[in-house]
Amino acid sequence: MFDLAELAEQAILVHVTFPQEHSNEDLQELSMLVASANVQAMHTVTANRRAPDTRLFVGSGKAQEIKTAVEQFAANVVVFNHILSPSQTRNLENLVQARVIDRTTLILDIFAQRARTYEGKLQVELAQLQHLASRLVRGWDNAERQKGGIGLRGPGETRLETDRRLLRERVKALLQRLEKIGLQREQGRKSRQRSATPVVSIVGYTNAGKSTLFNRLTSASVYAADQLFATLDPTLRQVKLDNFGPIVLADTVGFIRHLPHNLVAAFKSTLQETRDADLQLHVIDGADPRKDENIASVRQVLTDIDADSVPQLQVFNKVDQMGQNARIEHGDDGLPRAVYLSALTGDGITLLQQAIANLLSTEHIKLKLALPPHCSALRAKFHELQVITTERFNDDGVCMLELRLSLAQWARMLKHSNGELENYIVKAADI
């Protein structure tokens, strides 16, 4: 729906700093987002405000400065590094006489350019329609409205109502198609669970080097570039690790600060690979001075998609730019917690493979549970995960289960039961 590559080539960037640090975006990141959308940034307007203006987001004087910049640089779009309300967008467009887009719209446009698979395109369109739904406004010509009197009666609904109805119908159709694709993905996940093949998901901030690392580990040719959201569609490959065996490696879309909620919702099935993984490789650009903020942003998104309970190994990439050597850091439990490497040169890849094998070989547990009759839903969930080794019922109707499952699966089941499962543990021992 949005195509900045055709509609806009020259842009004025607007960045406002607020006293509340958590509400601020990063100006350098905005420049990278604009470049990723194939738009040329002609000029940047900055401002400081205590709070956004309800009518123009910026003050009237700063809005006039934006208008002057649009005229001076012959720009045809103004990009705000913030989320604008529909009314603020309309007021600004009327003033500056150019298209005004906010941060969410910009990210949606980049996603639309990057989507390659059928599922990815459906997800992007769904996110765009959900974003557009709040921006349908009145203003159609009177001829499009209902009218009274003979010969003047309309079709029974206003143009605005028609657009909203068509939009709802399209969203419903997209959700049905995505649900069908989600069921196909679920079959693939169940097949991997039956084969007991561990899934390792690569997560991290956008442009941290995830796809380069994926290509290095799998000898694949996934598109990798020095730009934000170079990867959009998830890619899965099987890799055989020495002294361990096969694993499934999943490359996923990169995260970003304040990732739009409708994007998270639209990419629910894609992010399922991250949520159901046995291990997450959190790739971090070690040469980025904002790496601590990026790490916090990734953790927030993982929490939002309910994937924060999956065991994680931090991978600090680009040691060649950091002036450091490849190495493994171990935690107090003796297990690897971080690997420093260079995905571009391959330095430290062997160390990463060793760390993955070490973590996967020690992360499964055996459990014996005594589930009372009212816990049939939890029993059904264990059957769905296919982690039950033996099952029997005693005379009181208590189900005695013996399980073999990963720590990530157990952590998710504990969270699902609000900790109730701990009351039914008979015996637990690491294997």
Image (cartoon, rainbow, N blue to C red):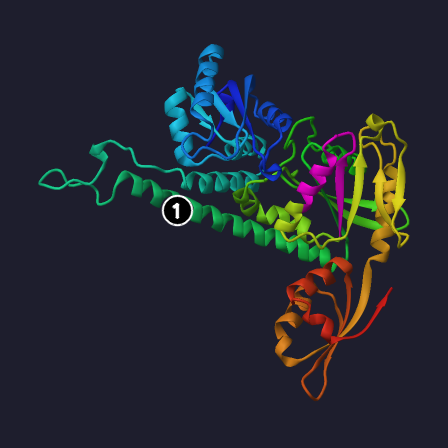
Residue range (magenta): 279-299
The front one of 115 and 74 is 74
- Residue 76 visible to an observer of this rendering: no
- The residue depicted at 65 percent of the width and 66 percent of the height is 418
> What amino acid type should be assigned to the residue bearing mark 1?
Arg
User: Where the C terminus falls, by quadrant?
Assistant: bottom right
- Name the secondary structure under disc 1: helix
Mark 1 surroundings: few (<14), some (14-19) or many (≥20) residues within 10 A:
some
Q: Where is residue 73 in the image (x, y as percent from the top left)?
A: 49, 12
Q: Where is residue 284 in the image (x, y as percent from the top left)?
A: 75, 37
The front one of 406 and 12 is 12
The front one of 22 and 382 is 22
Vertical placement of residue 47 versus 339, above or below = above
The front one of 293 and 36 is 293
Q: Is residue 9 left or right of residue 93?
A: right
Q: Where is residue 324 in the image (x, y as percent from the top left)?
A: 88, 30
Q: Is residue 285 one of those drawn in magenta? A: yes
> How many numbered discs?
1
Write down the quadrant of residue 55 in the picture.
top left
Vertical placement of residue 390 versus 307, above or below = below
Vertical placement of residue 22 versus 37, above or below = below
Q: Mark 1 points at which residue?
A: 168
